Amino acid sequence: MVIYCKTSLMPDTRPRIVFDDDGVCNACHTAAAKDAIDWDARRAEFLEYVERFRPKDGFYDCIVPWSGGKDSSAIAYKLKFEFGLNPLLVTYSPMMPNDIAVHNREEMINLGFDHLMVRSNQKVCRRLARRFLTERGDPKIHWHAGINAVPVQVAVNYDIPLIFYAEHGESEYGGRVLSEEHLKMRDFAEVLEHQIGDDPYNWMDEEIEEKDLAPYLYPDQNAVDEVGVKALYFGYFFRWSMKENYDFIKDKIDFQLAENGRTDGTFTNFDSLDDKIDNLYYYMQFIKFGFGRAVRDACRMIQNNQMTRDEALELARRYDAEFPKTYHDEHLDYLMMTAAEFTEVVDKHRDPEIWDRQGNNWVLRHPLA
Ligand SMILES: [Zn+2]
């Protein structure tokens, strides 16, 4: 049996999510609790942290891990132009870069930011993408290691002790919250714990050597401590809403949106635009857990009072199951797979508790309700 949250649409198949006895998920509780937060006090706390951790010398005050999307660009903009910091924008390159994001990043750089981008060896990256999609139904396992490691590697190597992350995903979207403190300051151990079983050293094979693992390795703890790296969540100090971030940044730069008016599998056109592989990534979430990108986006909007549950339900029913068609041929090429191999891999990851085969079709045993 799959249970859907009574307030949002999130099912209990989401990893680590917690439901209360009334059938409401903990992401909805996090959202509801925001009305009672004293945001002025949080802002004052933010200013205090900035002064305390800001380096006393050096060129950069902080690092912003930056995709060039609406969220990280809104943060970078505010840090620079509202709070007077000089951030270094650090991008761990998308696997399959999208021209829209290249344009959006260039718009920001032209406003006056320095930018550092690490693009990992694509021979290795593609081989790992193919392996992880096949074995675990997720082509981005190694990319997630890289996006966690690279900003901290830069912090250590450039001696910049302060990093600004966007939101605390576990509390914001439903997951496990280990301590109140971690909602504010990133606990690197918690982040690495979610990658357990993914020690990059296990990825070596006849073609991948130790030296190929550099972008995926978290820096040595002694080196991190020596620089005193601290990472704060912007979403703890300022009320977080992906739609408001979009509304903010579109007034500052010529922010381009998804081609064709919306992204595969959802009704939005402004989120997660930088990597063509994301359309496949979210589709595989749908295959593995029974909820896709439309449910994900709708939940966020319900929780921010930007949509009713009924409106969300209608959009989710319409788009959630949509095949990631826009870049399908490019996905196959990137993954070095034929269409038939791809279909076989997808079907292998359908959880029989979630999916029922009816003739030639797969249907959800417990559809959205
Ligand atoms: Zn919920």
Image: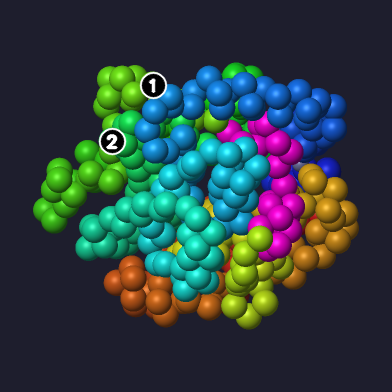
Give the alpha-carbon distance from disc 2 to disc 1, as whole Å. 12 Å
Q: Position of residue 320 (x, y in %)?
A: 67, 64
User: On the image, numbered disc 1 is attached to which residue?
Assistant: 228
Three-letter amino acid code at disc 1? Gly
Image mark for residue 157 = 2
Q: Is residue 57 magenta?
A: no
Q: Would you identify the image quadrant in which residue 201 lies?
A: top left
The answer, for residue 259, to whether it is visible in the render is yes
Q: Is residue 64 left or right of residue 92?
A: right
Q: Where is residue 180 drawn, in percent x and y?
A: 63, 20
Q: Quadrant of the N terminus?
A: top right
Q: Does residue 199 appear left or right of residue 86 in this picture?
A: left
Q: Secondary structure at mark 1?
A: loop
Dominant secondary structure (helix, strand or loop) of the stretch shown in magenta: helix
Residue at screen point 81% across, 59% down: 313
In the image, the segment drawn in magenta is: 233-251
The first of marks 2 and 1 along the sequence is 2
* Residue 78 image offset from top left, x and y in percent: 63, 45
Quick one: 353 or 281, which is closer to the camera?
A: 281
The reply, left or right, for residue 67 in relation to residue 131 is right
Task: Please report the residue visible at 86 percent of the width from the left and 61 percent of the height from the top.
Answer: 311
Question: Which of the labelled discs sits on residue 149, or is there none?
Answer: none
